[in-house]
Image (tube, rainbow, N blue to C red):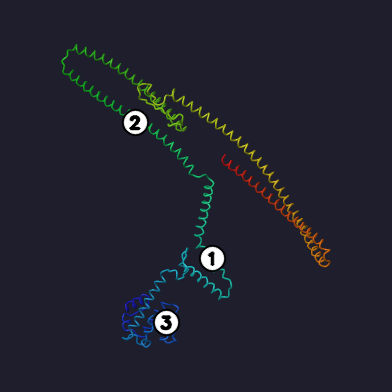
Amino acid sequence: MRQDVGQFLMGTGFEVAPQMLQNITGKDFRAVFQHLIECLDPIWSFKSEQRFEEQFMQALRAMKYPYIGQIDLKWLPTPAAMHSWPSLLGMLHWLVELCRAREHYMNSGHPTLQEPSLIPDEFDDISHHLALAFDHHAGAYVDFLQGQDSFAEQEKVLEDRYARKDARVLADLEQLRERLTEIQAEWEHLKKSAPPFEELKKDNGSLQRDKLKFEEILRRFEERKQKWQRLVQDEKTELEYNIASLEKMHAEEQRLADIVKVQNLSPEEVLRMNSEHESLSRELESLKHKIAETSQVVVRLEVSLTRKVSDAEEALDQYTSLLSTLGLFPPLAPPLEDVDLTIDLHSAASNPQGLLSGADIRKVVKPTLSRITEMKRTAHAEIESERIRVDDELDQLTLECETIEEEALEVMNKTNALNDQADELREAAQQEGLVSNAEASRLERDLAAARTAAMANGVGVKSRLQALQIAYREQVEKVNRLKEDTVRAVIKNSSEVVAFKDEVSKQLQYLRDFAEAN
């Protein structure tokens, strides 16, 4: 502990002698203690007029020293005593560790330091918010103490700081809004467009058909490749045979030359042989010249044949491309499923009849194409006739719809008239009911008066009372009858309106189903 305390004091610029902590005095202990307290709290002030013992305990209480009860103030004058130095050295070591912890904490950049300069541009920690709030309140309080009531500068600084914090979030929010707008537009487009499954099914069918056609084309090209490979192999074989024959001829020539050298011939025989040799040489030269001319003719004919074969192959390629474009590759649609319009060219065939393989052009291809043309023309005419028929039906349906709308309008007018009549009947019945009620009230009053008069006048008035009672019952029956008539009229009109509405709904539903079906 003594070494740790000495190293820390020297590290903080406090001059410490090597023997000071081994036999420390009261003055040195006080200086060390004050230096450690000032390291922990730079604004802590030790008063010279106040006793050190009082300031000592006050400082330890402020630093929350856990073993303050085990320290006796009597030890301070002689801190190096055997009974006091272990506890005081432990207290100094605790203060050193606390100073190191404070230094580590102050240099850690932790958010709870509440240093505005350590706050990043983007933050979410509550301590960063509290640091900005504390800095704002501190600056505003200073201005308040100087007599100001508005703190616009501090508020502007705080707003700029939070605006810088939210800049990236706002930019991300704007991008997300743009992305949302794009997604919504795409969603609306997808809702308005047809389901992609049907298009995919249609594309799948066309791709399957194209696959069959491409497989057929690949097969044809593969056959052509094999044919050319066979031709190349035949040419190589012929070239090897010619080379072998040439070597044999050279060997025969050398053998004959050796025989001539060993023979003993006379001058006449030599002259004769020379003359024969010259004549044979001339004949050989003429034959070589004829062979060269023949070779040139053959080369020209081969070039012409190659060009014609290339033209024929290009024509067949165009024909095959047209078949692929028009969808006439096998299998064809019924009733031509057994017809194959493909044609192959065999340029190496010796027989002219075998140059073309596949369908016969005169007997199969031309009649089939003519038949397909006629079928397409007939189908086009039928489609045109069907279109005209559908247009006529659509015009008829439009006229029927207009007629039904006019009938519906007439029925609606009739219904409105019936409703008006029902309202008039209801009002008339109400008026008659009011009149009947008034008449009944009057008769009740007359009846009461008659009863009174009867009681006063005796039996002579009884007949009048009975007449009034009969008139009252007739008025009541008349009122009830008018009520029943009014109710029946209202029910009848209501049922007619409901039936009309049902009929109109049925007609409109029928029109809607018919329109959707066509």
Q: Is residue 324 above or below residue 478?
A: above
Mark 2 vs mark 1: in front: 2
Q: Is residue 290 above or below residue 310?
A: above
Expressed as whole percent of the image width and height from the top left, the position of residue 396 reads: 63, 36
Nearest to N terminus: mark 3 or mark 2: 3
Taking the spot 42% from the left edge, 82% from the top edge, the residue there is: 61
Direction front: furthest residue: 459
Q: Earlier in the sequence, mark 3 or mark 1?
A: 3
Q: Secondary structure at mark 1?
A: helix
> Which quadrant: the C terminus?
top right
Q: Secondary structure at mark 3?
A: helix
Binning the other alpha carbons within 10 Å of mark 3 as few (below 14), some (14 to 19) or many (20 upward) gives few
Q: Quadrant of residue 204?
A: top left
In this view, the residue in front, 94 or 260, is: 94
| 324 left or right of 408 in image | left
Mark 2 vs mark 1, CA separation in Å: 82 Å
User: Which residue is denoted by mark 3 in the rendering?
Assistant: 61
Q: Are marks 2 and 1 in contact (CB under 8 Å)?
A: no
Q: Label 1, on which residue?
A: 159
- On screen, residue 257 versus residue 114, left or right, reads left
Q: Amino acid at mark 3?
A: Arg
CA separation, marks 3 and 1? 41 Å
Give the camera-side residue of 169 and 508.
508
Q: Position of residue 440 (x, y in %)?
A: 77, 60
Q: CA distance from mark 3 to mark 2?
A: 105 Å
Q: Which residue is mark 2?
A: 226
Amino acid identity at mark 2: Gln
Task: Write down the quadrant of residue 442 in the picture.
Answer: bottom right
